[in-house]
Image (tube, helix red, strand yellow):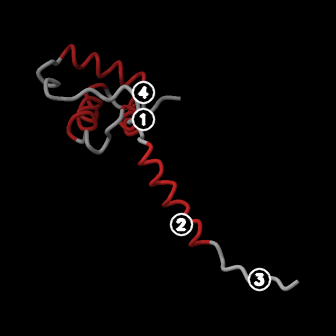
Amino acid sequence: MPTAQAELPKHRQWPEFLRVVIIERDKYPTLADAAEELQTSRATLSMRIQYARRQFPRVFADVPYYPKRAPVITEPQMLDWLRELLAESDAKQPAHEEVPD
């Protein structure tokens, strides 16, 4: 099944590619985010970026590479998330009435 990008004529795909990969880079910070926006696979987008970097080096001179991996999560960050989730869970729990013996 063709994707929306594949259905566009080739000359119309490049502006969308440039918008996502360069102009709105902060909005799509990972390769997966950009691929989803362009409705293509990460592998296809990665190959297209490599091609574009070789063919148009001046266009991509100041464009950072996408990170190879997801950002590393630190233990303090993980603990903060756990505390927040536990607090939310406690807030959602109804007050229990004590059951007489």
Q: Nearer the viewer, mark 2 or mark 4?
A: 2
Number of residues whose C-alpha sits closer than 10 Å to that of mark 1, classed few (under 14), some (14–19) or many (20 or more):
some
Q: Cα distance, mark 2 to mark 3?
A: 23 Å
Q: Residue furthest front?
A: 101
SS of the residue under disc 3: loop
* The image quarter in which residue 41 lies: top left
Q: Going by the picture, which residue comes out furthest to the bottom?
A: 100
Residue corresponding to mark 3: 98
Q: Nearer the viewer, residue 37 or 86?
A: 86
Above or below for 100 versus 86? below
Quick one: SS at disc 1? loop
- Camera-near label (1 vs 4) is 4
Q: Residues within 10 Å of mark 2 (few under 14, many from 20)?
A: few
Distance of label 2 from label 4 (alpha carbons): 35 Å
Earlier in the chain: of badge 2 and badge 3, it is: 2
Circle number at residue 42: 4
Marks 3 & 4, CB-CB < 8 Å contact = no
Residue identifier under label 2: 88
User: Above or below — where is 34 with respect to 92?
Assistant: above
Frontmost residue, 50 versus 19: 50
The CA span between labels 3 and 4 is: 55 Å
**Mark number, residue 29:** none
User: Quick one: label 3, few (<14), some, or many (20+) residues within 10 Å?
Assistant: few
**Residue type, numbered disc 2:** Glu
Name the amino acid, label 1.
Gln
